[in-house]
Image (cartoon, rainbow, N blue to C red):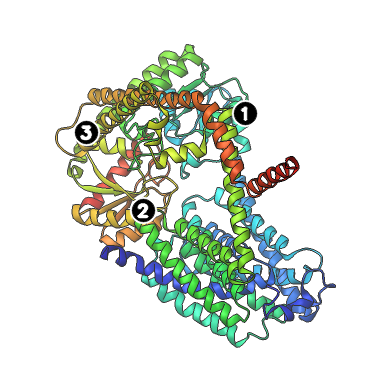
């Protein structure tokens, strides 16, 4: 666990800095309706670095950074112009055009790169896990300075004049360029939009929005990093999904916290009932119509509770299924064992001759085929058992689904009551 | 959103409002300067593109009398040239510094394939994009036809795993690790496959090709002995590689590749993986990390800094590094780089 902390605290500090500046820019970007502007700016910066690289400058040198910055400033000019056109064309459309053209131009240039196209990709695919404390030392003062500048200029930056728009996009471009190189496009977009969205959802003043966004963003980053370590998953992608969850939870809670609580409860119960009813009825119809097809609901239930199989397999099916599973596992282990022997023999002990390795290789391939055969048997046994049961389980699931559907029970009760009323004298 | 305090100040410029006067507010001279800068930059990029594209086109001179052959990678091109000598004109599709597994074909590849008489591919799911390209080109050579050579035929693949097996350090290839040309001994089988294809298409020159192959194998045999002797100090030296490309190379030269930075191609490593890799590197005293020119330097540099090891750039394809101009020099260069790094 100590090793984990040693690893995860530099990325956490980087995430903290990124949340700090991006939550602020996110609120601005949401207000201006230009959510994808960060992608366009990052792509332009990458194009600038590509041009520098093609002109013979080293990939991570100051000249290359200068080119990136120059391109970003040019893009800021363009973006500042788009404000003037936004009366007729949505600004997002122009931002999208800048993004795709910059991306395509960079591909054309990289295509002709003599060496090291990989350096250029790194500008857009930062990995927050691999950031060190030295990145924090660079970005913390930079972001603090930009934040301070925006605070000082806060009344002017929203006037919409060309010069101040340019200052806004240029400073945003500087932030995005450095943060994308650290954390990658996906994660930076999450940092930008999601804490800001949670803040805007729950508060009015920018101060409160920022506070909520900062707290939510910091907690989410910590949870994402922890999940990535504990579940052994790629860090950036895990954090992005965690940010998605962190937006979904307050979003789902919003009707309960702001509005008629009773109505929110009723609505959510009705929605859940409809979802469950549709799932059950849909699975029932699928089972009856195509019992051999994938049955997502049944498969998931069996995956969670393997003992369910014993309830619908007959004795012969259960025996065949079990035997096939045992053999499949045995073949897998045998193949693994041979692979392991070969791998170990590369550097340790006596070398295995080419002929023996060829034989082992062909054995491993045969084991693979045999395992596939056993897996086919397993699938076949299950498909036949489901085929046998389709007219008993299927209708039962359908009825259950209909009973769950909201209103059906009440409708039936009323029908019965009115019929009784009609029958009784 | 409507309740945001920023909105009122912005609203005159919002969508649907009358034409915004923003552009008018700034001096025209600044605008002009910006536009000129933008235009000159555009011109610069475009001229750069043209300059870069032109020599590539000029290079391709048709060899009329020679048998046209297309190989997917530069390694197979080099081996085909060794067998075909001056009676074949071999072109490879993937530029040598690109990752052949992620190659995006160009329109000109179709023209090249249409006119070719023989194709040589890596197989083992390595150059999967080639199947569609070959079918699309619709030339005389088609999959399974006489002019089609799968160089992996009869090679004993290592690390064969079903697709579902093992979350571990396997390659994403169900049909085994595809980097088989990195065992120089496998060149015997590869050149045999190429010889068979060439003799089928051009039987008149069959004896010429066969003599060429025998001469090449003789040179290879001499080289192999020298390489194995030179690689003796590398035996048992623990290494970490960026990607699992070195299975065959490691087996031939008895290298101990103990782990990989990127366990699955295209998936960034998890913190747990990096942490366990670092403790493994410390426990096994790994001093060398191997990466290819097209693999990211950043991840490798991070590990190297953490563990105090150095990294070595090795070429898995002919032409990926300076000095690797053909199949034999590929091994010369790689072994020299490894030996230099292994020296205390």
Q: Are the residues under badges 2 and 1 in a single subunit?
A: no
User: Alpha-carbon distance for marks 2 and 1?
Assistant: 41 Å
Q: Are the residues under badges 1 and 3 in a single subunit?
A: no
Q: Is label 1 in a helix, a strand or a loop?
A: helix
Q: Which residue is mark 3?
A: A341
Q: Is label 3 in a helix, a strand or a loop?
A: helix
- A56 left or right of B173? right
| Quadrant housing the C terminus of chain A | top right
User: Alpha-carbon distance for marks 1 and 3?
Assistant: 42 Å
Q: Which mark is residue A232?
A: 2
- Rendered residue at 49%/23% (across/down): A388
State the image coordinates of residue A326 (x, y, percent, origin top left).
30, 28
Check the residue under mark 3 and report the chain it is in.
A
Q: Residues within 10 Å of mark 3 (few under 14, many from 20)?
A: some
Q: Nearer the viewer, residue A36 or A132?
A: A36
Residue, far top: B204
Task: Choose top left, top right, bottom left or bottom right for residue A353.
Answer: top left
Q: Which residue is mark 1?
A: B136
Residue, far front: A425
User: Alpha-carbon distance for marks 2 and 3?
Assistant: 27 Å
């Amino acid at each position: 666990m100590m090793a984990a902390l040693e690893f995860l605290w530099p990325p956490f500090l980087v995430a903290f800095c990124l949340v700090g500046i991006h939550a602020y820019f996110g609120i601005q970007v949401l207000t201006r309706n230009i959510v994808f502007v960060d992608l366009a700016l990052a792509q332009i910066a990458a194009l600038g670095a590509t041009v520098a690289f093609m002109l013979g400058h080293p990939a991570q040198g100051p000249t290359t950074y200068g080119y990136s910055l120059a391109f970003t400033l040019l893009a800021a000019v363009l973006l500042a112009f788009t404000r003037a056109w936004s009366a007729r064309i949505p600004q997002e459309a122009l931002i999208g055009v800048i993004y795709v053209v910059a991306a395509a131009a960079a591909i054309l240039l990289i295509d002709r790169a003599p060496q090291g196209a990989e350096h250029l990709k790194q500008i857009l695919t930062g990995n927050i896990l691999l950031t060190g404390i030295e990145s924090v030392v660079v970005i913390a003062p930079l972001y603090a300075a930009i934040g301070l500048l925006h605070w000082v200029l806060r009344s002017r930056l929203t006037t919409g004049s060309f010069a101040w728009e340019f200052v806004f996009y240029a400073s945003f471009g500087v932030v995005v360029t450095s943060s994308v190189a650290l954390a990658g496009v996906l994660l930076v977009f999450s940092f930008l939009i999601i804490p800001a969205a949670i803040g805007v959802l729950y508060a009015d003043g920018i101060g409160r929005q920022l506070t909520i966004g900062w707290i939510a963003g910091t907690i989410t980053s910590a949870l994402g990093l922890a999940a990535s370590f504990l579940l052994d998953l790629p860090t950036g992608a895990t954090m992005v999904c965690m940010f998605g969850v962190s937006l979904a939870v307050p979003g789902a809670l919003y009707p309960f916290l702001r509005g008629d609580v009773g109505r929110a409860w009723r609505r959510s119960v009705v929605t859940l009932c409809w979802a469950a009813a549709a799932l059950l009825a849909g699975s029932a119809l699928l089972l009856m119509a195509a019992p051999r097809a994938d049955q997502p609901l049944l498969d998931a239930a069996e995956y969670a509770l393997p003992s369910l199989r014993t309830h619908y397999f007959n004795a012969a099916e259960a025996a065949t299924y079990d035997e096939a599973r045992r053999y499949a596992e045995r073949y897998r282990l045998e193949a693994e064992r041979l692979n392991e022997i070969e791998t170990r023999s590369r550097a340790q002990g006596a070398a295995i001759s080419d002929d023996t390795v060829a034989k082992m290789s062909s054995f491993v391939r045969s084991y693979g085929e045999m395992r596939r055969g056993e897996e086919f048997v397993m699938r076949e046994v299950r498909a036949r058992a489901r085929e046998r049961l389709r007219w008993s389980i299927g209708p039962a699931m359908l009825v259950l689904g209909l009973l769950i559907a909201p209103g059906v029970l009440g409708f039936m009760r009323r029908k019965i009551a009115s019929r009784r009323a009609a029958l009784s004298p | 959103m409507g309740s945001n305090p920023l909105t009122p100040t912005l609203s005159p410029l919002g969508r649907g409002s009358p034409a915004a006067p923003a552009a008018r507010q700034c001096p025209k001279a600044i605008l002009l300067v910006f536009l000129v800068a933008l235009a000159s930059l555009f011109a610069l990029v475009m001229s750069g593109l043209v300059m870069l594209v032109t020599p590539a086109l000029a290079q391709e001179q048709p060899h009329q009398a020679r048998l046209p052959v297309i190989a997917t990678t530069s390694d197979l091109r080099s081996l085909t040239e060794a067998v075909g000598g001056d009676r074949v004109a071999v072109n490879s599709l993937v530029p040598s510094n690109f990752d052949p597994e992620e190659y995006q074909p160009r329109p000109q590849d179709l023209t090249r394939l249409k006119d070719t008489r023989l194709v040589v591919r890596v197989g083992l799911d390595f150059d999967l994009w080639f199947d569609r390209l070959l079918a699309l080109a619709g030339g005389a050579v088609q999959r399974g036809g006489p002019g089609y050579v799968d160089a992996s035929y009869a090679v004993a693949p290592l690390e064969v795993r079903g697709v579902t097996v093992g979350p571990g350090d396997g390659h994403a290839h169900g049909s085994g690790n595809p980097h088989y040309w990195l065992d120089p001994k496998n060149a015997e089988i590869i050149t045999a496959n190429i010889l068979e294809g060439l003799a089928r298409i051009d039987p008149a020159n069959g004896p010429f090709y066969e003599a060429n192959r025998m001469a090449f194998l003789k040179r290879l045999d001499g080289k192999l002995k020298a390489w194995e002797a030179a690689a003796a100090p590398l035996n048992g030296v623990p290494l970490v590689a960026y990607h699992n490309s070195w299975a065959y190379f490691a087996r031939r030269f008895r290298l101990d590749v103990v782990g990989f930075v990127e366990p699955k191609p295209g998936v960034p490593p998890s913190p747990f993986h990096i942490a366990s890799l670092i403790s493994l590197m410390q426990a096994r005293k790994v001093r060398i990390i191997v990466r290819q020119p097209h693999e990211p330097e950043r991840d490798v540099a991070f590990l190297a800094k953490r563990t105090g090891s150095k990294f070595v750039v090795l070429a898995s394809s002919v032409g990926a590094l300076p000095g690797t101009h053909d199949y034999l020099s590929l091994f010369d260069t790689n072994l020299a780089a490894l030996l230099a790094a292994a020296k205390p």
